[in-house]
């Protein structure tokens, strides 16, 4: 899992040490030598888990997709950014604030069929049985 590129779709095999990395920064952090750059690159798709080779000197728009599963692996990189946000209270903790839309309170002064003057979806409507 790469901490530099959050939406990495492929792993890249480095030609110098033959290890798999998600980005150039991951190689620079773990290895003591610089990344050897070549035109023939080996990729491993993270969606279908299959490897394929691409010649990056002749890279076209059709080469932006995995040849096995058509996963689009050339994307704008999402990098982690610092963000300030205010967290509110979790509404799941106090469920008294959540109104159940299936029930409605009897505002006509206790004319409901349920206990305490509340009409629920389980109480039949008195008008529904009338014909005509």
Image: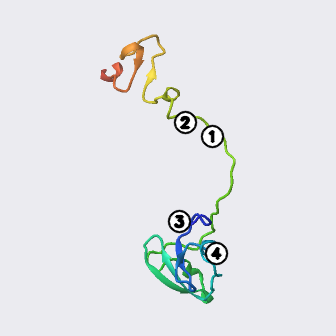
Q: Which residue is mark 2?
A: 90
Q: Secondary structure at mark 3?
A: loop
Q: Tell me which label, 3 or 1, sits earlier in the chain.
A: 3
How far apart in space, not on screen, are marks 4 and 2 (Cα)?
A: 41 Å
How crowded pointer 1 is (Cα within 10 Å; few <14, some 14-19, many 20+) is rated as: few
- Which image quarter is the C terminus in? top left
The disc, 4 or 1, on the residue closer to the chain's N-terminal end is 4
From the viewer's perspective, tell me whether residue 117 is left or right of residue 28: left
Estimate the spatial distance between the alpha carbons at disc 3 and disc 1, rounded to whole Å. 27 Å
Distance from Cα at disc 4 to Cα at disc 3: 15 Å
Q: Which is more foreground, mark 4 or mark 2?
A: 4
Quickly name the residue at label 1: 87
Q: Nearer the viewer, mark 4 or mark 3?
A: 4
Q: Nearer the viewer, residue 6 or 14?
A: 14
24 above or below 93?
Answer: below
Quarter of the image for residue 23 reads: bottom right
Task: Give the residue pinned by disc 3.
Answer: 1
């Amino acid at each position: 899992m790469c901490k530099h590129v959050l939406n990495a779709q492929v792993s890249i095999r480095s030609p110098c040490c033959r290890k798999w990395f998600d980005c150039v920064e991951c190689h620079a952090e773990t290895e003591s030598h610089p990344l050897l750059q070549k035109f023939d690159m080996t990729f491993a798709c993270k969606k279908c888990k299959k490897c394929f080779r691409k010649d990056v000197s002749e890279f076209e728009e059709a080469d932006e997709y995995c040849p096995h599963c058509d996963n689009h692996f050339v994307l704008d990189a999402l990098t982690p950014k610092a963000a300030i946000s205010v967290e509110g209270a979790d509404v799941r903790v106090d469920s008294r604030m959540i109104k159940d839309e299936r029930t409605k309170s009897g505002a006509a002064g206790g004319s409901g069929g349920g206990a305490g003057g509340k009409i629920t979806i389980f109480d039949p409507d008195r008008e529904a049985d009338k014909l005509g």
